[in-house]
């Protein structure tokens, strides 16, 4: 199990387990689905700002059924990955099996049933409003309340699915280490943003729905959006302020002041952050090749390893070598 520093419960009492999980997810029914069945449950958990991370095991013997009705629904999404046993989610008239190659998304705003056998797993818990708030920040608009629907299955055969699971496992390791002990607010915010970005990237069409669903979006100015999009499209290439101003169709000063006003940083600082995020993601996920930090850094335009290490630790709370070592 993960989160050894964040013990919440160890119990053979189904009522205690039900109460604890109700605090972390939403109040729900939880029963042993076999006469004389016995649980041997352990729950660990922590917060990453507005996100929750959980690691749990219910024991090998007792099949368990969790369920909610309309009166128990809440504004929470739980993304679950299996570490042992099996599980099947029933929701919205369909069934989704948990497996080593498939995670599940439980939208607790709607009734569900979950059948578990010998189950152990990890979960990331996020509120709908937190997810919407982050999505609005990504696309530069302030929308009203939006129903952010997600598919029940997380296909771990896809790059997006693997990246999300890797991000959750990375966060679990980090919260078990110095980051979880120090409670650095900047590092926690960066970790939260990274997890949310991976979750939203799993369903890119959701961003389009966010824009279409709101009748009064406030979008980034056209020239700032063009420059930002150029940065994302060409982050691994040489980019100058002149390149950005030319592509955006405005002067240097307008671009500088616009970025600071709308995004809080200068264009070149924004570019550096995008490259750092890309470098971090490649260290974490990779493609199976054994590479050095310097080799990956070179692809993202970083040549001064000492300076990079300092920037990386400020943003992610660890050194690049720590992230690469975890992947291996």
Image (spheres, rainbow, N blue to C red):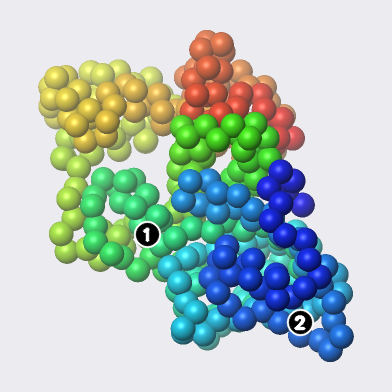
**What residue is rendered at 56% in x and 29% in y?**
317
Question: How many discs mark residues in the rendered view?
Answer: 2
* Position of 172 relative to 115 (above/below): above
Residue 129's tag is 1
Spatial CA distance of label 2 from label 1 is: 33 Å
Q: Is residue 177 left or right of residue 218?
A: right
Task: Give coordinates of residue 215: x percent, y percent.
Answer: 17, 64
Residue 155 seen from this side:
no
- In this view, the residue in front, 10 or 57, is 10
Which mark is first along the chain, 1 or 2? 2
Q: Are the residues tagged 2 and 1 within 8 Å (C-beta)?
A: no
- In this view, the residue in front, 124 or 213, is 124
* Position of 151 relative to 62 (above/below): above
Between disc 2 and disc 1, the foreground one is 2
Residue 152 lies in quadrant: bottom right
Look at mark 2 in the image and give the residue it sits on.
Answer: 32
Residue 268 seen from this side:
yes
Q: The residue tagged with tag 1: helix, strand or loop?
A: helix
What is the crowding at mark 1: few (fewer than 14 residues within 10 Å), some, or many (at least 20)?
some
Give the quarter of the figure containing the C terminus.
top right
Residue 18 lies in quadrant: bottom right
**What residue is rendered at 14% in x and 20% in y?**
253
Q: The residue tagged with tag 2: helix, strand or loop?
A: strand
Task: Give coordinates of residue 47: x percent, y percent.
Answer: 55, 49
What is the crowding at mark 2: few (fewer than 14 residues within 10 Å), some, or many (at least 20)?
some
- In this view, the residue in front, 76 or 260, is 76
**What residue is rendered at 49% in x and 20% in y?**
311
Task: Give coordinates of residue 207: x percent, y percent.
Answer: 34, 56
Task: Give coordinates of residue 132: x percent, y percent.
Answer: 35, 57
């Amino acid at each position: 199990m993960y989160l050894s520093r964040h013990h919440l419960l160890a119990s053979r009492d189904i009522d205690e387990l039900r109460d604890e999980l109700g605090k972390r997810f939403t109040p729900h029914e939880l029963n042993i689905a076999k006469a004389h069945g016995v649980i041997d449950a352990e729950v660990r958990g922590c917060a990453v700002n507005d996100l929750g991370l959980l690691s749990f095991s219910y024991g090998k013997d007792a099949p368990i059924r969790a369920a909610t009705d309309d009166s128990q629904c809440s504004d929470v999404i739980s993304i679950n990955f299996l570490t042992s046993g099996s599980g099947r989610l029933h929701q919205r008239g369909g069934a989704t099996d948990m497996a080593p190659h498939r995670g599940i998304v439980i939208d607790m705003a709607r009734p569900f049933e979950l059948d578990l056998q010998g189950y152990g797993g990890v979960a990331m818990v996020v509120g709908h409003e937190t997810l919407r708030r982050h999505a609005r920040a990504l696309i530069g608009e302030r929308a009203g309340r939006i129903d952010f629907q997600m598919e029940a299955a997380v296909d771990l055969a896809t790059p997006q699915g693997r990246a999300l699971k890797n991000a959750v496992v990375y966060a679990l390791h980090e919260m078990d280490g110095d980051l979880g002990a120090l409670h650095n607010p900047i590092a926690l915010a960066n970790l939260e943003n990274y997890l949310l970005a991976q979750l939203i990237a799993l369903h890119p069409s959701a961003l389009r729905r966010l824009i279409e669903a709101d009748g009064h979006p406030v979008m980034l100015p056209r020239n700032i959006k063009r420059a930002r999009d150029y940065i994302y499209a060409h982050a691994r290439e040489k980019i100058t302020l002149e390149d950005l101003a030319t592509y955006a169709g405005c002067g240097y000063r307008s671009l500088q002041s616009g970025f600071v006003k709308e995004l809080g940083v200068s264009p070149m600082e924004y570019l550096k952050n995008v490259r750092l995020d890309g470098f971090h993601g490649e260290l974490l996920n990779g493609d199976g090749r054994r590479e050095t930090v310097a080799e990956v850094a070179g692809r993202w335009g970083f040549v001064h390893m000492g300076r990079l290490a300092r920037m990386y630790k400020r943003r992610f709370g660890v050194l690049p070598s720590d992230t690469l070592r975890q992947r291996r």
